[in-house]
Image: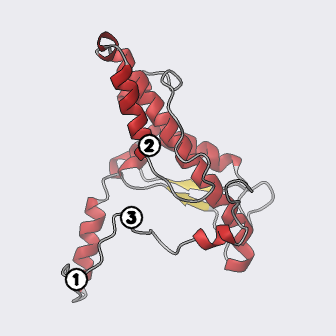
Amino acid sequence: EPLPRGGDPAAVALPVPMQRKKNFDFSFAGLKTAVRVQVERAPAELRGQQSFRANVAASFQNAAISHLEQRLKYAMSLCAKQAVSWGASPTTLVLSGGVAANAELRRRLQKLCDATAAPGATPGGTWSLVVPPPRLCTDNGVMVAWAAAETLQLGECHIADGQEVRARWPLGKSVASLAVDGIMPQPGK
Protein backbone atom coordinates (compact mmCIF):
# COMPACT_ATOMS: atom_id res chain seq x y z
CA GLU A 1 0.00 0.00 0.00
CA PRO A 2 2.83 2.54 0.47
CA LEU A 3 3.66 2.54 -3.26
CA PRO A 4 0.37 4.06 -4.53
CA ARG A 5 0.48 6.77 -1.84
CA GLY A 6 3.47 8.30 -3.61
CA GLY A 7 1.87 8.23 -7.06
CA ASP A 8 -0.61 10.20 -9.12
CA PRO A 9 -3.87 8.23 -9.60
CA ALA A 10 -4.51 10.00 -12.92
CA ALA A 11 -1.00 9.56 -14.36
CA VAL A 12 -1.62 6.27 -16.17
CA ALA A 13 -4.79 5.93 -18.25
CA LEU A 14 -6.55 2.83 -16.97
CA PRO A 15 -10.18 1.83 -17.55
CA VAL A 16 -12.69 1.33 -14.79
CA PRO A 17 -13.84 -2.25 -15.42
CA MET A 18 -17.30 -3.10 -16.71
CA GLN A 19 -18.49 0.51 -17.00
CA ARG A 20 -21.23 -0.41 -19.47
CA LYS A 21 -22.57 -3.30 -17.40
CA LYS A 22 -25.10 -2.01 -14.92
CA ASN A 23 -25.21 -5.05 -12.66
CA PHE A 24 -23.62 -6.32 -9.46
CA ASP A 25 -20.78 -8.32 -11.01
CA PHE A 26 -17.20 -7.24 -10.75
CA SER A 27 -14.00 -8.29 -12.43
CA PHE A 28 -10.47 -6.98 -12.47
CA ALA A 29 -9.20 -9.09 -15.39
CA GLY A 30 -9.39 -6.30 -17.97
CA LEU A 31 -7.83 -3.84 -15.57
CA LYS A 32 -4.89 -6.15 -14.92
CA THR A 33 -4.41 -6.55 -18.67
CA ALA A 34 -4.51 -2.76 -19.13
CA VAL A 35 -1.79 -2.35 -16.49
CA ARG A 36 0.38 -4.95 -18.19
CA VAL A 37 -0.03 -3.26 -21.57
CA GLN A 38 0.75 0.21 -20.15
CA VAL A 39 3.90 -1.10 -18.45
CA GLU A 40 5.05 -3.00 -21.55
CA ARG A 41 4.57 0.10 -23.74
CA ALA A 42 6.51 2.38 -21.41
CA PRO A 43 10.17 2.99 -22.29
CA ALA A 44 12.57 0.83 -20.30
CA GLU A 45 14.19 3.84 -18.62
CA LEU A 46 10.76 5.00 -17.41
CA ARG A 47 9.81 1.54 -16.10
CA GLY A 48 12.84 1.59 -13.84
CA GLN A 49 11.81 4.80 -12.11
CA GLN A 50 10.16 4.68 -8.70
CA SER A 51 7.78 7.48 -9.72
CA PHE A 52 6.49 5.44 -12.67
CA ARG A 53 5.86 2.41 -10.48
CA ALA A 54 4.08 4.61 -7.93
CA ASN A 55 1.94 6.18 -10.65
CA VAL A 56 0.98 2.77 -12.06
CA ALA A 57 0.10 1.52 -8.57
CA ALA A 58 -1.93 4.65 -7.74
CA SER A 59 -3.75 4.52 -11.09
CA PHE A 60 -4.55 0.84 -10.64
CA GLN A 61 -5.79 1.42 -7.12
CA ASN A 62 -7.96 4.33 -8.28
CA ALA A 63 -9.57 2.33 -11.11
CA ALA A 64 -10.14 -0.74 -8.89
CA ILE A 65 -11.75 1.31 -6.12
CA SER A 66 -13.87 3.22 -8.65
CA HIS A 67 -15.15 -0.15 -9.90
CA LEU A 68 -16.07 -1.23 -6.37
CA GLU A 69 -17.73 2.13 -5.67
CA GLN A 70 -19.87 1.78 -8.80
CA ARG A 71 -21.01 -1.73 -7.87
CA LEU A 72 -21.77 -0.64 -4.32
CA LYS A 73 -23.87 2.26 -5.60
CA TYR A 74 -25.93 -0.25 -7.58
CA ALA A 75 -26.30 -2.47 -4.51
CA MET A 76 -27.23 0.45 -2.25
CA SER A 77 -29.82 1.56 -4.81
CA LEU A 78 -31.25 -1.95 -4.89
CA CYS A 79 -31.46 -2.01 -1.08
CA ALA A 80 -33.40 1.26 -1.12
CA LYS A 81 -35.81 0.01 -3.80
CA GLN A 82 -36.35 -3.42 -2.23
CA ALA A 83 -36.48 -2.49 1.46
CA VAL A 84 -40.27 -2.80 1.72
CA SER A 85 -40.54 -6.09 -0.17
CA TRP A 86 -37.62 -7.53 1.79
CA GLY A 87 -39.07 -6.40 5.09
CA ALA A 88 -35.64 -5.05 5.99
CA SER A 89 -33.72 -1.86 5.42
CA PRO A 90 -30.00 -2.57 5.19
CA THR A 91 -28.03 0.47 6.34
CA THR A 92 -24.60 -0.95 7.09
CA LEU A 93 -21.75 -1.85 4.76
CA VAL A 94 -19.10 -4.19 6.16
CA LEU A 95 -15.61 -4.14 4.66
CA SER A 96 -13.54 -7.11 5.78
CA GLY A 97 -10.72 -9.40 4.79
CA GLY A 98 -7.23 -8.43 3.69
CA VAL A 99 -8.43 -5.67 1.37
CA ALA A 100 -9.99 -3.85 4.34
CA ALA A 101 -6.51 -2.88 5.50
CA ASN A 102 -6.17 -0.55 2.49
CA ALA A 103 -6.48 3.01 3.82
CA GLU A 104 -7.55 4.53 0.49
CA LEU A 105 -10.32 1.97 0.07
CA ARG A 106 -11.52 2.63 3.61
CA ARG A 107 -11.48 6.40 3.02
CA ARG A 108 -13.39 6.24 -0.25
CA LEU A 109 -16.00 3.78 0.98
CA GLN A 110 -16.54 5.95 4.05
CA LYS A 111 -17.07 8.91 1.72
CA LEU A 112 -19.55 6.86 -0.35
CA CYS A 113 -21.48 5.78 2.76
CA ASP A 114 -21.56 9.33 4.10
CA ALA A 115 -22.99 10.58 0.79
CA THR A 116 -25.63 7.85 0.34
CA ALA A 117 -29.05 7.97 1.98
CA ALA A 118 -29.79 4.77 3.85
CA PRO A 119 -33.17 3.13 3.34
CA GLY A 120 -35.40 3.42 6.37
CA ALA A 121 -32.93 5.63 8.23
CA THR A 122 -33.97 8.83 9.93
CA PRO A 123 -34.27 11.75 7.53
CA GLY A 124 -30.77 12.64 6.42
CA GLY A 125 -29.46 9.30 7.68
CA THR A 126 -26.72 7.68 5.65
CA TRP A 127 -25.12 4.29 5.36
CA SER A 128 -22.72 3.18 8.07
CA LEU A 129 -19.36 1.62 7.28
CA VAL A 130 -18.01 -1.03 9.62
CA VAL A 131 -14.36 -1.95 9.21
CA PRO A 132 -12.16 -3.87 11.63
CA PRO A 133 -8.87 -2.31 12.69
CA PRO A 134 -6.14 -2.94 10.09
CA ARG A 135 -4.34 -5.37 12.39
CA LEU A 136 -7.40 -7.64 12.20
CA CYS A 137 -7.75 -7.41 8.42
CA THR A 138 -6.26 -10.66 7.28
CA ASP A 139 -6.58 -12.81 4.22
CA ASN A 140 -9.75 -14.86 4.12
CA GLY A 141 -7.77 -18.11 4.05
CA VAL A 142 -8.05 -18.16 7.85
CA MET A 143 -11.82 -17.66 7.59
CA VAL A 144 -12.13 -20.52 5.08
CA ALA A 145 -10.05 -22.79 7.34
CA TRP A 146 -12.17 -21.83 10.35
CA ALA A 147 -15.39 -22.63 8.43
CA ALA A 148 -13.93 -26.03 7.52
CA ALA A 149 -13.02 -26.71 11.16
CA GLU A 150 -16.55 -25.77 12.28
CA THR A 151 -18.04 -28.04 9.59
CA LEU A 152 -15.87 -30.97 10.69
CA GLN A 153 -16.77 -30.33 14.33
CA LEU A 154 -20.44 -30.70 13.36
CA GLY A 155 -19.55 -34.12 11.95
CA GLU A 156 -20.02 -33.04 8.35
CA CYS A 157 -17.59 -33.80 5.59
CA HIS A 158 -17.47 -32.56 2.04
CA ILE A 159 -16.07 -35.13 -0.36
CA ALA A 160 -14.41 -33.52 -3.38
CA ASP A 161 -14.96 -36.46 -5.76
CA GLY A 162 -17.97 -35.87 -7.99
CA GLN A 163 -18.51 -32.30 -6.82
CA GLU A 164 -19.14 -29.48 -9.22
CA VAL A 165 -16.18 -27.12 -9.40
CA ARG A 166 -16.99 -23.49 -10.14
CA ALA A 167 -14.35 -20.81 -10.60
CA ARG A 168 -16.91 -18.10 -9.85
CA TRP A 169 -19.04 -19.16 -6.93
CA PRO A 170 -21.89 -16.84 -5.92
CA LEU A 171 -21.58 -15.17 -2.54
CA GLY A 172 -25.29 -15.38 -1.78
CA LYS A 173 -28.73 -15.30 -3.32
CA SER A 174 -28.50 -14.09 -6.88
CA VAL A 175 -29.95 -10.66 -7.50
CA ALA A 176 -29.43 -10.92 -11.25
CA SER A 177 -33.14 -11.61 -11.79
CA LEU A 178 -33.99 -8.31 -10.11
CA ALA A 179 -32.18 -6.46 -12.88
CA VAL A 180 -34.46 -8.11 -15.39
CA ASP A 181 -37.46 -7.13 -13.26
CA GLY A 182 -36.55 -3.48 -13.66
CA ILE A 183 -34.86 -2.89 -10.32
CA MET A 184 -31.50 -2.31 -11.92
CA PRO A 185 -31.31 -0.77 -15.40
CA GLN A 186 -29.95 -2.97 -18.15
CA PRO A 187 -27.33 -1.66 -20.60
CA GLY A 188 -28.88 0.49 -23.28
CA LYS A 189 -32.14 1.07 -21.41
- What residue is shown at x 63% (from left), y 67% (from top)? 90
Mark closer to the chain start, 3 or 2: 2
Instruction: Using the image, tell me which numbered label, if any, was put on residue 103.
Output: none
Q: Amino acid at mark 3?
A: Arg
Q: Furthest residue to the top? A: 45
Q: Is residue 93 visible?
A: yes
CB contact under 8 Å: marks 1 and 3: no
Q: Quadrant of residue 126?
A: bottom right
Q: In the rendered view, tell whether residue 19 sits above or below residue 171.
A: above
Left or right side of 102 for 90? right
Instruction: Using the image, tell me which numbered label, if any, was put on residue 168.
Output: 3
Q: Secondary structure at mark 3?
A: loop
Instruction: Using the image, tell me which numbered label, if any, was put on residue 162.
Output: 1
Q: Furthest residue to the front? A: 188
Residue 65 in picture, x, y percent from top left: 51, 42
Left or right side of 141 for 97? right
Residue 7 in picture, x, y percent from top left: 44, 22
- What residue is shown at x 39% (from left), y 23% (from top)? 54
The residue closer to the viewer here, 26 or 58, is 26
- What residue is shown at x 70% (from left), y 46% (from top)? 115
Q: Is residue 1 visible?
A: no
The residue closer to the viewer here, 121 or 46, is 46
Instruction: Using the image, tell me which numbered label, if any, was put on residue 30.
Output: 2
- What residue is shown at x 52% (from left), y 36% (from top)? 15
For label 3, the crowd category at 10 Å Cα-Cα, with few meaning under 14, some 14 to 19 and many 20 or more, is: few
Q: Quadrant of residue 34?
A: top left
Residue 73 in picture, x, y percent from top left: 64, 53
Q: Amino acid at mark 1?
A: Gly
Looking at the rendered image, the quarter that the C terminus falls into is: bottom right
